[in-house]
Amino acid sequence: MAIRNSAKALILHEGRLLFNKCVSRLGVYYALPGGGQHEGELLTEAVKREVMEETGLTVEPMRLSAVFERVSGHEGSVKAHKMYFVFLCRYLPEVPAREPVERDAYQVGMEWLTVDEACAASLFPRVVRDNLPALLDYGETIYLGSERRGGDR
C-alpha cells in the first residue's frame, strides 16, 4: 500500500482564513482547501492546483507550515496512510477568480473566518484547529503528530 500525500492550504488574507464549508450527516464542518498530489507533481504545484479546483482562487505558497499524518486500519493491517502537508499561502486577489471545477465530496461552499472563529468552529482535522495560532505565527514547520484509526494507538 502506497502512502498518499495531500497538500493543504492555510490561506491568509486581510486577517481571515479561507475554509471549505462542508455538510455531512454529522452537520456543518470546515476543512482546509487542498488534496492529493499527482505523480511527478511538486507539493507546491499540488496545493495551487487543488485550491484552484476547489475554490477558483489563485494562491502562492509561502512556507510549509505543518505536517500531519493519518493511519487507518485494524489490528496491524493498514488500510490507508495519508500524509498532510499544510502550506501557509497568500491569496492573489489581482488574479481573477474562476468557477470551482472539482469540489470536495461534502463541500457546499467556502467561507472566510477569523482565527478566533476558526478556533471555535468544527474544523477538520482537529489538530489543525488546535494549533492554528502556531501554524500562522511560527517560522518553522511543525510536526503535528499522527492520528491512528483502529488498531494500536
Image (cartoon, helix red, strand yellow):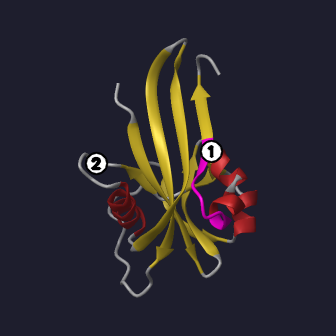
Which residue is located at x 66 percent, y 46 percent?
Answer: 127
Q: Earlier in the sequence, mark 1 or mark 2?
A: 2
Residue 57 seen from this side: no
Which of label 1 and label 2 is nearer to you?
A: 1
- Please tell me whether residue 143 belongs to the stretch shown in magenta: yes
Position of 15 with respect to 62 (left or right) is right
Q: Position of residue 131 (x, y in %)?
A: 70, 54
Residue 10 seen from this side: yes
Task: Please rate how many residues cluster around mark 1, counting C-alpha atoms within 10 Å: few if below 14, some from 14 to 19, many from 20.
Answer: some
Looking at this view, name the residue that lies furthest to the top.
75
Spatial CA distance of label 1 from label 2 is 23 Å
Front-most of 27 and 7? 7
Number of labels in the image equals 2
Q: Secondary structure at mark 1?
A: strand
**Label of residue 144 in the image:** 1
Q: Position of residue 135 (x, y in %)?
A: 63, 60
Which residue is located at x 62 percent, y 17 percent?
Answer: 152
Q: Position of residue 84 (x, y in %)?
A: 49, 46
Q: Is residue 18 above or below residue 143?
A: below
- Please tell me whether residue 108 belongs to the stretch shown in magenta: no
Q: Position of residue 13 (x, y in %)?
A: 57, 78
The three-letter amino acid code for the residue at tag 1 is: Leu
Which residue bears the numbered disc 2? Answer: 38
Task: Please rate how many residues cluster around mark 2, counting C-alpha atoms within 10 Å: few if below 14, some from 14 to 19, many from 20.
Answer: few
* Region of the chain picked out in magenta, as a range: 136-144
- The image quadrant of residue 140 is bottom right
Say whether marks 1 and 2 touch (CB < 8 Å). no
Q: Is residue 71 above or below residue 9?
A: above
- The image quadrant of residue 18 is bottom right
Looking at this view, name the residue that lies furthest to the left.
40
The three-letter amino acid code for the residue at tag 2 is: His
